Amino acid sequence: MNDRAITKEELIAEDLTAALQAKRIWSSIIFNIKDFGAKGTGDDRRAIQDAIDKAHENGGGTVYIPSGTFSLGSQSTEIPGYLLILRPGVSIDGPGTLRVGNGVAPYMGIFEQSKAHGDLNDVFYVNFTIDENAVGNPLTVDPIHANPPIDFRRVFHIYSGDNMVFDNLTMKNGVNQNSIITNKATNITINACRFLNMGADTTTNHDHSTLYVVGDGAVITNNIFQAKGIGIRTAIEIHGQDKLIQGNIISRYRIGLIYDSDERNNVMAKTVNIDNNIMNDVYFGIELWSMDGEVNSLNVTNNNISINRNGYFPVNGLEGGILLYTPSKFSVRNLDIKNNKITYTRDTVSRNTISYASGIRLVLDNLPVDMENVSVTNNTIVGALGSGISWYCKGRNINVKIKDNEIINPGSTLYGTLSDDFKSGLIIYNNDQFINCLVENNRFIDTQAAPTMKFGIRFNGRTADQAESNLRIVNNQVLFNKGAAVPFKQYYSFVTNYPIFHAEIPSWDIRTVFNAPYRSSIYDPVSGREYIQTKPGVGNIWRSNSYAMEAPATGYWNQGDSVTNTFTVYGGNERWVCTVGGRAHLHSNGNTTLGSPVLTNVTNVQTWEVGDRIRSTHIPDGSTIAAVDVTQKTVTISNPATGNSIGYFLYDAAFYPVGIVNGNQLLPQSDSAAGDLSSMRADFNELLKRLRAAGLMSYGG
């Protein structure tokens, strides 16, 4: 063995050029493992350990692994179960590969910190490859549950230290518990590393986190994680505060990332940014835990997550993109979930219940802990197996905002047990208390030929949740095929504190299917009409307001609907109020077939529409048009009656002008400039009295 310490310049010829070009801060002394007997033809573990020990004895230095493959074919006698022992002040660099020999397992780890020698400060491990050789060391049991545990196979096990760098490393073919675990070490950088073939096709379901980083201060950026095997679990698990996780690419892990508060009990975890990561074909995307302390100042932004639960072991049916960990024990405050995209692959095999399989899950249902200053904004969720967003907090919801999200085709599971309630764009259920909470400007869309969304927003209230005064649901759009879903559903009819709902939807007959809280509104961008629910409590008594220069000549209108004149003149009309509901024009027909539900030879058939109501002495009240065939000039009637040939015609709407006299309105002005339709009901009743008193309208209406 040549134990001469050689200089950096002497090793440039041995492939150090690339490392120097990376502008690393080198230790003054370099220790080449070949100078300590490593040959690449047998077990080189002892030679590599001698190089590490000599660098440490020298007061620090860099162990250099030159090009080639060097075998780790035995275990250390200093710390049994480990292959190489790390020393303070010693860094490792080089383009070569360290490969675990066949039959070395079971073992606890490859690189183990020696606690007896102190902290690992200001060291770097860069540029080399570690081949864990899972084929030559198959895993047969879950190592975490073995008694005693003897087969963790960690690559780097760090207990303590500060300012460590892992850069441009490749770790491959592993069935370990962790590739890098840093426990209480602080200020860790893991950058541009590759973790390839993790799991190595094992079918053994075992506890695994490729990265397990606990201490304060960490930068985890631009790494690649590729799992293979249905038993592999988590790519990145982090604890503590002051973390940046950015630009990582994760594929085929069961869990992309877990964040938890500090393991030191009751220590608040704060200032964590999870940004611009890509997670492909994961079962869970990002799980946010608050098991050991409060979570504060956590930002989850700009991540792209694709969920594919096919090919994994069945778990608990909670698969989703961004999730609060439901058994958490502490509050979550100042959480920002923004600009993320979450997409689902439809399941191809049956699984267990998936009620909580939401794109974003805001659920803390273990203990009465709070969600405070939580913002979910500008996220896109496509094809969630369950609801797009679910929201349930057993404690207080304080300043929780769900805004500007787009939820497309929720409830898309083909298998598993899932009630219609959880096939919603947003489900809000069983929350204990709302304090200044808002649901605003979200879009809930179903674009499918066979729609799966059952509700735009599903609200399950509680008697003391203060939703009436502290939860606003405003300006949300619910877009779907006609009749495919209900925009809003309130579950408990005995609950009186309904949140007010405001939505924008395309034109369809909303009034017959949508029971909504009093003063809720729906804006129809096609017709330009705004509907307001005027029955106190909850109901479907909708009155609309719109704007035009003259009384309507088309469209369907309810008694009490109002049209505001946009071109008023002195002494003219301020608005028109519908006094008889129906179409704003007359349809008629003669010479129909006796006693048939199908009317033939219908004149003006092109003006008859499905859903129109029929008026005739021989047709029961409430009969409507079920179908129209313009080519054959036939109309199908629901609830037809037998009788003689008779003319059928539709209800035609009647509008009464409300005039302006000497600049003053004939009837009281609404409180709002747009026309508050809750007060228009009183206006309309007063109008009816005047019409009847003038003999212009009978009480039969």
Image (spheres, rainbow, N blue to C red):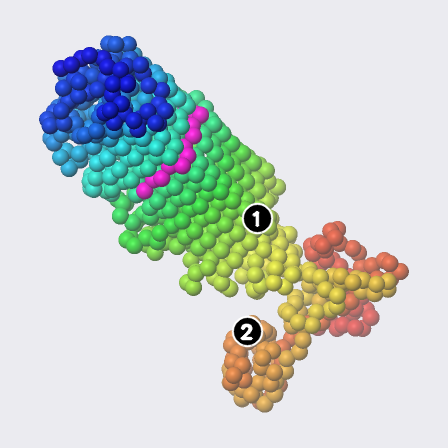
Tell me which residue sits at (76%, 62%) in the image. Answer: 565
Type of amino acid at the residue the image marks with label 2 = Val
The magenta region covers 239-251
Residue 17 relative to residue 475: left or right: left
Instruction: Choose the circle earlier in sequence order: 2 or 1.
Output: 1
Location of residue 286 (image quadrant): top left
Q: Quadrant of the N terminus?
A: top left
Q: Is residue 318 visible?
A: no
Residue at the disc numbered 1 = 441
Q: Is residue 349 above or below residue 338?
A: below
Query: Crowding at label 2, few (<14), some or many (≥20) Cα neighbours within 10 Å?
Result: few
Viewer-side residue, 614 vs 15 = 15
Is residue 242 covered in magenta? yes
| Distance between the alpha carbons at the discs numbered 2 and 1 | 32 Å
Q: Is residue 598 above or below residue 142?
A: below
Q: Position of residue 595 (x, y in %)?
A: 52, 86
Tell me which residue sits at (33%, 37%) in the image. Answer: 224
Element carrying mark 1: loop
Residue at the disc numbered 2 = 610
Which residue, as the protein is rendered here, is positioned at the far right? Answer: 662
Q: Quadrant of the C terminus?
A: bottom right
Q: Position of residue 645 (x, y in %)?
A: 58, 89
Location of residue 324 (image quadrant): top left
Q: Is residue 341 visible?
A: yes
